[in-house]
Image: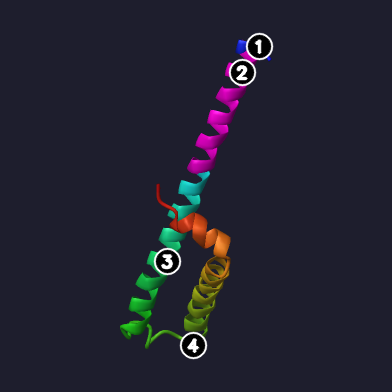
Amino acid sequence: MTIAQDLSLTWEEKEEREDLFTARAALENLTNVLLEELVRFEGIKNSGSFDTLPADLLQAFVRWEKAYKDVKDLLMADSEIVDIYQWRP
């Protein structure tokens, strides 16, 4: 390989590494928002604020919450995803 080729390859690898950590940060942020907002929603739901909602509306909210809880459970059941999520330099 030439010096120019070595430099080009090193630059490409650097960009790939930066992309990897940018992508990881995006998914970490998404996961954090999911976890935080599920807790926030649960607090509102448990406060009694939904007690007067029509049953069909309440059930729609509960199904929506369940869908997000299912996503959370799926993510947290994958040990490799958890390892990536919890990793810190």
Q: Identify the residue position indicated by label 4 in the image.
A: 55
Mark 2 Cα shell of 10 Å, populated few (<14), some (14-19), many (≥20): few
Q: Earlier in the sequence, mark 3 or mark 4?
A: 3
Q: Mark 1 and 2 residues: CB-CB less than 8 Å, in contact?
A: yes
Closer-to-camera residue (54/29): 29
> Identity of the amino acid at label 1?
Thr
- N-terminal of the pair, mark 1 or mark 3, is 1
Q: Which residues, given as a range, are shown in magenta?
A: 4-22
Tell me if mark 1 has few (under 14), some (14-19) or many (20+) residues whose alpha carbon lies within 10 angstroms of its own: few
Identity of the residue drawn at 47% across and 57% down: 85
Q: Position of residue 9 (x, y in %)?
A: 62, 23
Give the SS element for disc 3: helix
Q: Amino acid at mark 2?
A: Asp
In the rendering, at what x and y percent does residue 72 appear?
Answer: 51, 69
Q: Main secondary structure of the magenta part?
A: helix
Q: Secondary structure at mark 1?
A: loop
Number of the front mark, 1 or 4? 1
Dot 4 alpha-carbon crowd within 10 angstroms: few under 14, some 14 to 19, many 20 or more = few
Camera-near label (1 vs 3) is: 1
Earlier sequence position, callout 1 versus callout 4? 1
Label number found at residue 2: 1
